[in-house]
Amino acid sequence: MSRTKSTNLRVLTLATALLAASACGSDAVNDSIDDVADAGDEVSEQVDAAADDVDASAGDLADVLEQNGLESLASAVEEIDIAELVDSDEFTFFAPDDEAFRTLDGDDIADLLADPEQFADVLRRHVVGRTIDAAELAEMTSVETEGGTTLDVSVDGDTVMVGDATVTRTDIDVDNGVVHVVDRVFVEA
């Protein structure tokens, strides 16, 4: 609910209580108004806190990526709302490390950054619409990404491969999901 709707709801609730209490004495009216105003303030504060949480979690992925040495991806993700990439409340993100971006051709990178929709499509190939921790991933044979790509999963000793990428770090917690670091960018569908 938007903050404007929250304020309107609070005013409507206060007006309704005022009308209902008008049949009572003036002390009862004042007490009712104070009670409704306090309740309205509490609801408004809860809505504001929830909105602040949503704002904070939107930046949380970029912050977590940066804190884990994934500066290239962190700066790109700051420009994209992860909720626009995922059709669920939770996600798994196979995050390419900085070296993976350095292996791309300079023209490919320039093309991706020049076309936000194409870049979002590439990122969707790295996102699964549910949380998959490392233990579950190691038991899987494939994952379906939000970009419609099926990535094969294979395990050889301690090495886990997703598509043609090696998983180099696992289980980095982020709001509503988990990040696994990979050494490739899934550019092609």
Image: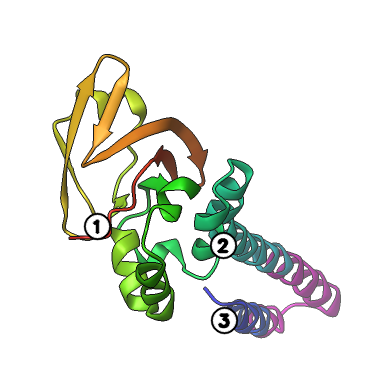
Q: In the figure, is residue 44 to the left or right of 112?
A: right
Residue topped by disc 1: 146
Query: Does the rendering let one see residue 179?
Result: yes
Label 2 close to label 3 by CB (< 8 Å): no
Give the x, y percent position of residue 35. Answer: 75, 66
Q: Secondary structure at mark 1?
A: loop
Task: Choose the circle earlier in sequence order: 1 or 3.
Answer: 3
> Does residue 81 lie above or below 162 as drawn?
below
| 34 in magenta | yes
Where on the picture, by quarter, is residue 169?
A: top left
Comparing 160 with 91, the one in front is 160
Q: Quadrant of residue 32?
A: bottom right
User: What residue appears at the point 21 percent right and 42 percent down from the top-left corner?
Assistant: 163
The foreground one among 177 and 67 is 67
Q: In terms of depth relative to the viewer, which is nearer, 105 or 172? A: 105
The reply to whether dot 1 and dot 3 touch (C-beta < 8 Å) is no
Kindly indicate the quadrant of the structure image that contains residue 114: bottom left
Name the spot of residue 116 as percent of width and height, x first: 39, 77
Looking at the image, which residue sits at the far right?
A: 27
What is the three-letter code of the residue carrying label 1?
Glu
From mark 1 to mark 3, how far is it between C-alphas? 33 Å
Q: Residue flagged by tag 3: what amino acid is it? A: Lys
Q: Is residue 96 magenta?
A: no
- The mark that comes first in sequence, 2 or 1, is 2
Magenta region, residue range: 17-40
Binning the other alpha carbons within 10 Å of mark 2 as few (below 14), some (14 to 19) or many (20 upward) gives: some
Residue at numbered disc 2: 75
Asked if the residues shown at circle 2 and circle 1 are in contact, with their CB atoms under 8 angstroms apart, the answer is no
Main secondary-structure element of the magenta-colored stretch: helix
Residue at which label 3 appears: 5
